[in-house]
Image (tube, grey):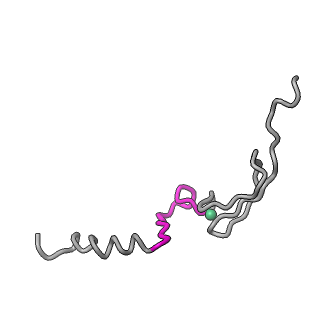
Amino acid sequence: MKSGIHPKYNEISVTCSCGSVFTTRSVVKTDLDIEICSACHPFYTGQQKIIDTAGRVDKFRRKYGDRQSGTSA
Ligand SMILES: [Zn+2]
């Protein structure tokens, strides 16, 4: 067994935008800020969730959303 060939893993704390904080092991030494984690990811929650940071989705819907239910066909 050679020693010193593996990177040193540090225990860091990861803070998600949903408020969830957990610790993980990483080669980076600094704490992380993430936007999505296993607690709020749609894959895990089973819920469709759109992360709309700047109201872009709302703007898009206002502009194009009415076409679906438009009176003219
Ligand atoms: Zn999260």
The percent coordinates of residue 36 (x first, y second) are 59, 60
Q: Verify whether residue 43 appears in magenta.
A: yes
Quadrant including the N terminus: top right
Q: Is residue 4 left or right of residue 73?
A: right
Toward which corner of the image does residue 56 lie, by quadrant?
bottom left
5 or 61, which lies in front? 5
The percent coordinates of residue 9 (x first, y second) are 80, 44
51 or 44, which lies in front? 51
Quadrant including the C terminus: bottom left
Q: Is residue 71 left or right of residue 27?
A: left
The percent coordinates of residue 21 (x first, y second) are 72, 64
Q: Residue at x 62, y 57 (%)?
A: 38
Q: Main secondary structure of the magenta part?
A: loop
Q: Residue at x 56, y 59 (%)?
A: 41
Which quarter of the frame holds ligand 1?
bottom right
Toward which corner of the image does residue 71 lie, by quadrant?
bottom left
Q: Verify whether residue 31 appears in magenta.
A: no
Toward which corner of the image does residue 63 lie, by quadrant?
bottom left
Relative to 65, say whether 12 is above or below.
Answer: above
Relative to 48, say whether 28 is above or below.
Answer: above
Q: Residue furthest left?
A: 73
Relative to 58, say whether 50 is above or below.
Answer: above
The percent coordinates of residue 6 (x first, y second) are 80, 33
Q: Which residues are magenta?
A: 40-54
